[in-house]
Amino acid sequence: MRNLKIDIRALTTLAEMAAVEDLQRTLSGDDLSIYHRNQLIAMVRNGAVLLGAYDGERLVGYVFGYMGTEAQDSSRPAMANLKLASQRMAVLPEYRNQGIGYELKLAQRQYAIKQGIRLITWTFDPLQSRNAHLNIRKLGAIVRDYWRDYYGTSPSPHVTLGSSDRAIVEWWVTHNRVEQRINGNRIGLSVEQYTNANATILNPTRLGANGLPQPDGAVVRSAGMVALIEIPSDYNTIVQRDPDLAWAWRLHSRDLLEQALASGYTVTDFVHGNFEGRERSFYALTYSDAPPTGFSNN
């Protein structure tokens, strides 16, 4: 990994919007799914925030968000529900895994705090472990809501095997847990530490003959204050090698996360590491009031 000096700055000119448009086109190859320069400049000039990451004069990543409201059916004024909806973030492949996405999110957080905004929201595929690690483990965000097929099922860059399920991220940017995660004052627990503290693994998995993790048919339907839900550490490889297994994982994780969240749990951590002799990944969910008696079978 080379020593990078990345500069992150707000983008405000039409030329900078054109660079973001070109970067999106390079990454997606789908002209229909990108924000074009005229759309971007109009939104930025009306309150949206677009931040770019530069290696010298080269744009290598960006994060884009706009103002929204958290509770659309609330009787309170919109100002009381104001949030920043983080719509899209991307980094060039050759610059990934070097902390640029993390730095873009921190810059976005600083912008929100200066504007007096407490909440940033965005979505991610809950089977993507790398995104879960960044969003939940490193940034200190939480998840309390799950949307089936958020972007529909028609073929697009947002759809995998006919599904676009998304977890809804809530990043309460001034919360103490976020401060602690970002400043390194909140030490993340390992899987062993969670299980030693009586956290229940709701869906213990096994390895199939092909070496890929299999969702077990027997799912624990009750748990205590803390529960663990396992997902594949590398879902994209399963999609490529065994689409039927990938779809089984989608249905399995959808059912379990929906029921856990509906039962009062909140995703508060993500744990990845070696456990019982193999690499594994888990969401940690916390029940805030009292332990439920069990998940619904409906």
Image (tube, rainbow, N blue to C red):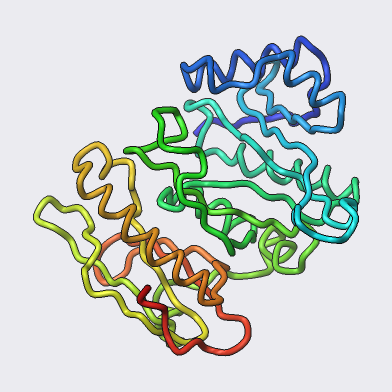
In percent of the image, x 46 and y 51: which residue is there?
148
Q: Position of residue 173 (x, y in %)?
A: 76, 57
Q: Nearer the viewer, residue 95 or 238?
A: 238
Vertical arrangement, residue 122 with respect to residue 187, above or below: above
Vertical arrangement, residue 286 with respect to residue 46, above or below: below
In percent of the image, x 63 and y 46: which residue is there?
122
Left or right? Give the position of 111 relative to 35. Answer: right
Vertical arrangement, residue 277 with respect to residue 291, above or below: above
How many marks do you count on the picture?
A: 0
Asked which quadrant contains residue 86, the reply is top right
Q: Position of residue 125 (x, y in %)?
A: 47, 47
Q: Position of residue 39 (x, y in %)?
A: 73, 19
Vertical arrangement, residue 275 with respect to residue 106, above or below: below
Left or right? Give the position of 231 relative to 60. Answer: left
In percent of the image, x 41 and y 78: which residue is there?
296
Q: Nearer the viewer, residue 36 or 69?
A: 69
Q: Position of residue 80 (x, y in %)?
A: 88, 57
Left or right? Give the position of 75 relative to 229. Answer: right
In percent of the image, x 45 and y 77: which residue is there?
227
